[in-house]
Amino acid sequence: MRADNNHERRWSGPPRMARLRLGWLRAALCGAIALLLVTGLVADLSILPLDGLQPESARAESAMTGPGTYVVSATKEGLVGGMTSSGHIIVPNDYFVSLPACTPTNCPGGPYWGQMTPCGSNCYVKVTNLANGACRVEPVLDTGPWFRVDDWWSPTASRYLNKLASNPQDLPQGYTGADAARDGLNVGYGKGASDVYGTVGNRSAIDLADGTWDDIGLGAGGYVSQLGVEMLWQSGADPGSSASACGHPLNEKPGGSALQLSASSGTVGSTVTVSGSGYTSGETVRIYWNSTSSTPLATVTASGGAFSVSVTVPELPRGSYQLIARGATSGKQEAAPFAVAPSLSRTPTSGPAGTQVSVTVRGFGANEQVRLTWISATGQVLGTATTNALGTGSTTITIPSSPVGSYDYVGTGLTSGARAYGSIYVTGGGPTPTGTVSPTVSATVPGGTGTAVVTGTGGGGLN
């Protein structure tokens, strides 16, 4: 994932007042050089360190090429077996993209960081290999690669980074945070840094899952300096039609599993759509969790031999399970893996410092302690919840003294290492009474293991 310095872009517009400062600096430096030459103190200009003063022509335009279309640098995600910010377990030859800010699909129940991009049901990105024209349309299932708060596709006035008091820049739409950091700018987290990393290692503004990368022929190396990117919620293009034009079904699932799941992982209480085919027409198909000896989660009739039904993820510890589909007449049985991810919920969701907040943890390890911290996993300890045999527990925390704004709170399993994120909005005034309904927030599990299953026949599916 190295940067190709021969293709690094430069921003066309400098930070606030920078043109005036740079012009003054150039004039002063030119005067000093002239004086040195006249006095004979310097005879060779090559010894002067002028590399940092680049002419206006050295700065390229924004990456935006049209409404919702951009050309940016990209990297190959890899990380097979890991869990994305949406709770998706990455499989070999997977199909999805990662963007460096929250959308409803990579931060379900969020935003966990920064602000949410309101892309609705069109949270899909078309990526195009500009060298051969090959393209794919993929869902947004993870955050990254370098930022979690850089909605670089948003208009200048609404970009999250431009709202930070610590950011002296005014970043235009399409000028990515990674580009700005590589250009040596401070976008709110220090020169050359992001909200996650002290040093941004290359200019990548989007990650592509391995199957996406390979299918459009981006080749070895894991980094490209120019990738065509179209945000379909901005361009207005239909995701299904765009995917067909690229030669593949929307939400394509890698491998040859006949049973299709709308997600390969999820949190306790979330819903998963199970679809299958190849059953006897009109027969009853029962969906089981992990074993056909358990009580069915759902029962459906296979119309024309195919079915689709939604089930709710039961209360269980984190880990890998199976969703199983079994035909009552044919006896046909198939399964698909599903991972239960940890999650946090809280009530109330906001309040001033000193407010008591009830936090429930779900999907963590059985009978383990879950440490709750403020802002990050190494932040101020707020309290500890102890889970039961089903990985669920609760405790009460107090909102620390903090300026008005949205803050992360983090749950970390002290035995499993599972980690989940949530957010609390700190308001002004006195403590707020508890009792409001709390939304569930999905989570990530670093290095976690787990499996789940549903069965059917047919191929393809959703991730």
Image (cartoon, rainbow, N blue to C red):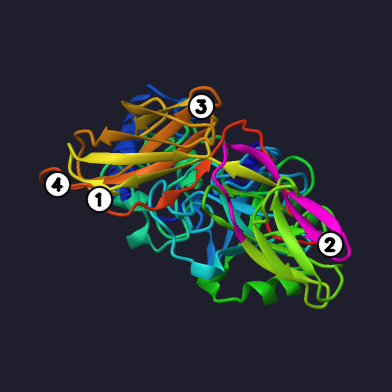
Question: Pointer 2: what residue?
Answer: 457
Question: Pointer 3: what residue?
Answer: 367
Please tell me which of labels 2 and 1 falls first in the chain.
1
Q: Secondary structure at mark 1?
A: loop
Residue 314: percent from left, percent from top: 57, 48
What label sits on residue 348 in the rendered view? none
**Residue at the image point whose x is 49% and y is 54% from the top:** 108
Q: Is residue 84 magenta?
A: no
Residue 188: quadrant of the picture: top left
Amino acid type of disc 3? Asn
Q: Nearer the viewer, mark 4 or mark 3?
A: 3
Question: Pointer 1: what residue?
Answer: 435
Q: Is residue 142 left or right of residue 181?
A: right
The answer to whether residue 230 is above or below residue 447 is below
Amino acid type of disc 2? Thr
Q: Nearer the viewer, mark 2 or mark 3?
A: 3
Q: Is residue 262 visible?
A: no
Q: Is residue 304 left or right of residue 98?
A: right
Please tell me which of labels 4 and 3 falls first in the chain.
3
Q: Nearer the viewer, mark 2 or mark 4?
A: 2
The span picked out in magenta is 311-336
